[in-house]
Image (cartoon, grey):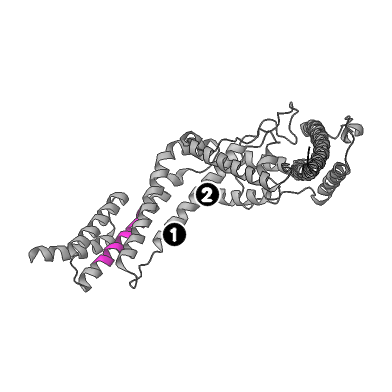
């Protein structure tokens, strides 16, 4: 016959079993509700995508004839999009209200901008771009801009490491087991739907800002297109001033690349070439100024001073070599866009850089000569050979020495000659 302890234990297990059934039923109910919520959110996301695509197509149609004043009023108004939407939650209704409010606020706070006058002399105009005379010709709407590639630069050199994946999976399993032990029910955390709404809202704000720039600054950007397309220069300094002015004009856009992709006639290749020429010339001039103004510090240690001089010479040779390697193709491209290219020749900035390297050779030889005259070290021959080798390096790079550099070299050679006589 069962004892009282067995009966009490059976009663306890029965109560535990009933409680477990109740918890299981509640979990299944909650899981079903979450599935409905996920399905509803997916439907709303698809509806938002359809709504966004419809608005994009309307925007493309408007951009075909931005200067046409004969369009009837009924086509100027934003058409209402009739989309069958499921029952919306209060959070999604607030999202739509905020989107409409942001769109109207963006249009009010971003007035159309007029281009400022160019800070340069009258450039020689070139032929007018076809299709840009007051307004752009009607053209079929282009496809949406492509999404950025997910493959990083140089991905061909990257190899998969299986040990990384295995270690990551082992850590994930260990973490999941720890969470299951800490949670009596073992329910996995569920992503909060509010996070999805926040992401959609932030993305919509960015797209609305781009759309507002396209609609508000359309005439302003068309005027910049004409300026860039018809610009021609005779001096590289004019290119620098023009690029500085252009960057200032485009700084009002929320995303320059994303906005300008909506304008088919934007001369992207010419604008990039102008910026490339101005940036390259400015970098070379800054390097020349740094080399020409270099002054050796007698209080600094010998190795540090010589290392600084060698580093500057390395930068000079690397900059000149890189420019000479691409000079032929780059100069041809610059001529097509009416950009000055003579500064890349040996008679231009390259010649100036080579001449500035003579100052480095003179400072290098002076420091070694001073060190050999003032102190007696066990590595005198090494220092002498080091100075002569650097002088020969600069001599080959610059194509010779000037009078000052040659005088400094003669002083260094006298020390070597006196040692040979001894």
Q: Quadrant of residue 3?
A: top right
Q: Is residue 359 magenta?
A: yes
Q: Nearer the viewer, residue 45 or 208?
A: 45
Q: Is residue 412 magenta?
A: no
Measured as percent of width and height from the top left, residue 51 is found at 82, 33
The reply to whether residue 189 is in sight is yes
Quadrant assignment for the C terminus: bottom left
Residue drawn where x is 40% and y is 59% of the image? 291
Q: Secondary structure at mark 2?
A: helix
Residue drawn where x is 40% and y is 40% of the image? 325
Q: Which residue is mark 1?
A: 289
Q: Which residue is mark 2?
A: 279
Q: Secondary structure at mark 1?
A: helix
Measured as percent of width and height from the top left, residue 37 is found at 82, 37
Measured as percent of width and height from the top left, residue 39 is found at 81, 32
What predominant SS class does the magenta segment belong to? helix
Quadrant assignment for the N terminus: top right
Residue drawn where x is 81% and y is 51% of the image? 109
The reply to whether residue 161 is in sight is no
Q: Nearer the viewer, residue 312 or 165?
A: 165
The disc, 1 or 2, on the residue closer to the chain's N-terminal end is 2
Measured as percent of width and height from the top left, residue 138 is found at 76, 28
What residue span does the magenta drawing correspond to?
354-368
Looking at this rendering, what residue extends furthest in the right direction? 74
């Amino acid at each position: 016959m069962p004892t009282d302890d067995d009966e009490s234990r059976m009663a306890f297990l029965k109560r535990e079993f009933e409680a477990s059934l109740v918890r299981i039923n509640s979990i299944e109910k909650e899981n079903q509700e979450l599935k409905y919520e996920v399905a509803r959110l997916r439907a709303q996301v698809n509806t938002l995508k359809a709504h966004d695509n419809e608005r994009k197509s309307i925007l493309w149609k408007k951009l075909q004839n931005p200067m046409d004043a004969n369009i009837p009023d009924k086509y100027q108004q934003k058409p209402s999009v009739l989309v069958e939407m499921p029952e919306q939650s209060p959070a999604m209704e607030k999202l739509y209200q905020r989107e409409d409010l942001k769109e109207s606020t963006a249009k009010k706070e971003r007035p159309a901008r007029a281009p400022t006058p160019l800070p340069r002399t009258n450039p020689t105009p070139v032929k007018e771009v076809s299709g840009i005379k007051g307004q752009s010709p009607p053209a079929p709407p282009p496809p949406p801009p492509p999404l950025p590639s997910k493959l990083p630069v140089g991905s061909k050199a990257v190899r998969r490491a299986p040990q990384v994946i295995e270690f990551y999976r082992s850590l994930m399993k260990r973490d999941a087991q720890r969470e299951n032990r800490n949670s009596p029910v073992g329910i996995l955390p569920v992503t909060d739907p509010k996070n999805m709404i926040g992401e959609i809202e932030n993305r919509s704000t960015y797209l609305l800002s781009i759309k507002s720039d396209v609609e508000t600054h359309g005439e302003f950007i068309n005027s910049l297109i004409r300026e860039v397309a018809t610009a021609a220069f005779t001096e590289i300094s004019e290119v620098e001033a023009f690029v500085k002015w252009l960057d200032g004009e485009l700084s009002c856009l929320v995303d320059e690349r994303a906005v300008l992709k909506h304008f088919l006639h934007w001369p992207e290749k010419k604008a990039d070439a102008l910026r490339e020429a101005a940036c390259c010339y400015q970098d070379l001039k800054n390097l020349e100024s740094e080399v020409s103004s270099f002054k050796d510090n007698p209080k600094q240690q010998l190795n540090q001073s010589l290392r600084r001089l060698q580093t500057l010479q390395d930068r000079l040779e690397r900059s000149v070599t890189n420019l000479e390697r691409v000079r032929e193709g780059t100069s041809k491209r610059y001529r097509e866009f009416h950009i000055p290219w003579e500064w890349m020749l040996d008679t231009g900035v390259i010649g100036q850089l080579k001449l500035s390297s003579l100052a480095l050779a003179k400072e290098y030889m002076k420091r070694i000569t001073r060190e050999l005259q003032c102190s007696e070290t066990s590595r005198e021959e090494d220092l002498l050979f080091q100075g002569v080798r650097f002088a020969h390096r600069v001599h080959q790079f610059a194509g010779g020495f000037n009078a000052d550099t040659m005088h400094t070299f003669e002083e260094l050679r006298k020390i070597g000659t006196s040692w040979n006589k001894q």
